[in-house]
Amino acid sequence: MNIFRKKAVSYVVLVTTAFCMLFTSPDAAQAATVSSVTREITLESRSAGSADKSSWYVDYVGYNTVTKDTNTTYNNSPYSIKVVNNTYSVTEVKKTYKVKAGTYYRASAMVKCSGLEADPSATTKNTGAFIGENFSYNNSEPSTSEKWKNISYTFYTGDSTEYSISLKNGVWYGECKGTVWFDNVKLEELKTTDKWNVLTIFFTRANGTGKMSNGKKVKIKSSISDSKIKEYKKILNGLYDDMDKVSGGLMDVKNIDYRVCNMKLKDFLPYDYTDQWGVDIHCLQYNWDVPKVRRKIMNIIGDKNYQQIILIVPHSKTFGWWGLTGGGFNGINCSVIQTGYEDYMINSGYPTNVFIHEMAHGLEHNTNVGRSTPIASLHSSADYGYSSNSEADSYEWYKDYYRDKIKGGKGIDPAVYWKPLNSGKVISDDMTLGSGIY
Ligand SMILES: [Zn+2]
């Protein structure tokens, strides 16, 4: 843990005429979980190990062990990689692949666990065996199953032509102990589509207690009514036309699925920011790292191919935000919208504005992957001479942003409108072992 530094991402929050949104810092990972975008790891003076690009090697092991196991294997393969965490910790076994820029890939593995136990003091209990980006929060959903299970993680290469995948026992902030076997690791190049399927899930009930960073406990009890759901569906159906208009035909929302989930959301995380007047605000956000909640969302996704997820959650005065984008589920962009601002949305002239804004954040992030110089921040319209007095004014900015018309090539890269399909072709299933694995 001492070889790297973790720090919280500082969000910038706009609080203007009841229009309040969050965004991730340009370099914040579109991580595997929504709330994990509140964290960021900074790579600093990290020992790289021997960068054996042709094989799997131990990248971060601590006091744990990584061995070649010829007894416990998947489907009679010659061997698996066995990772034993002796203490609550993280082990990463890494391989670097040569990849094509501007391409989507899916990394997958078969995993089997034994005696996995989450660190009781870790921030997230959503832990276990993962496959994901090396030394990052971009991961598959975890498995803790004692039977062989498939885990997979989809990623976009952006400007990068090399990409490092890790097999992980535990994850940063979600340390665990116990044994994991990894086998049948595959890398697939995915086909893409520019027709977006959007999944909207209404989480209708929030009921629990959250503790703010200043120690103040807040009881949250809030819900979304059936009529509110109807109102949102009507607004969201506007995206079919509005996305086409704002993007000049670059983005095509093909289908929006609606699901209602009555599972009680009861876990909240402290969330702090400084508003535009320099006042420190303490508030709460929903915790999307809760394993039960994540499993629910993954079950709703099922085998369907979605390019965007929108979670609509009950309003609470303790939340400092309206819309929030960051993280996702297995590489799918995800935005969270809090109810309570519908009148403002409708009165602004184009009710879909909050969705256009939040989905642009996902695309902003997708564009920035692998770039040394990020594109214009979605919140920097004034720096580029656009008026941002009202949401109607912002439309010109969004239009140019979506169409890559911001001067200096600082808008969304049109390539990122092409999103991955579930199908692809295997480009590597190499399991050659390198340094540190015996
Ligand atoms: Zn924003």
Image (cartoon, grey):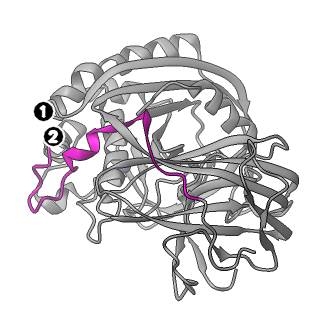
Residue 419: say if magenta: yes
Disc 1 residue crowd, few under 14, some 14–19, many 20+, Cα 10 Å:
some
At x 66%, y 74%, the residue is 58
Toward which corner of the image does residue 26 lie, by quadrant?
bottom left
Q: Which residue is mark 1?
A: 248
Q: Which residues are magenta?
A: 403-430
Of the 4 image quadrants, the one containing the N terminus is bottom right
Of the 4 image quadrants, the one containing the C terminus is bottom right
Which amino acid type is marked by label 1? Gly
Q: Is residue 212 left or right of residue 198?
A: right
Mark 2: secondary structure: helix
Q: Is residue 282 visible?
A: no
Q: Is residue 76 left or right of residue 302?
A: right
**In terms of depth relative to the viewer, which is nearer, 427 or 393?**
427
Disc 1 beta carbon < 8 A from ligand 1?
no
Q: Is residue 222 left or right of residue 383?
A: right
Which amino acid type is marked by label 2? Lys
At x 20%, y 45%, the residue is 414
Toward which corner of the image does residue 424 lie, by quadrant?
top left
Mark 1: secondary structure: loop
**In terms of depth relative to the viewer, which is nearer, 166 or 424?**
424
Rendered location of residue 189, percent (x, y): 40, 45
Q: Which residue is mark 2?
A: 399
Residue 17 is marked as: none
Toward which corner of the image does residue 215 lie, by quadrant?
bottom right
Disc 2 residue crowd, few under 14, some 14–19, many 20+, Cα 10 Å:
some
At x 61%, y 54%, the residue is 131
**Nearer the observer, disc 1 or disc 2?**
1
The answer to whether mark 1 and mark 2 are in CB contact below 8 A is yes
**In terms of depth relative to the viewer, which is nearer, 172 or 224?**
172
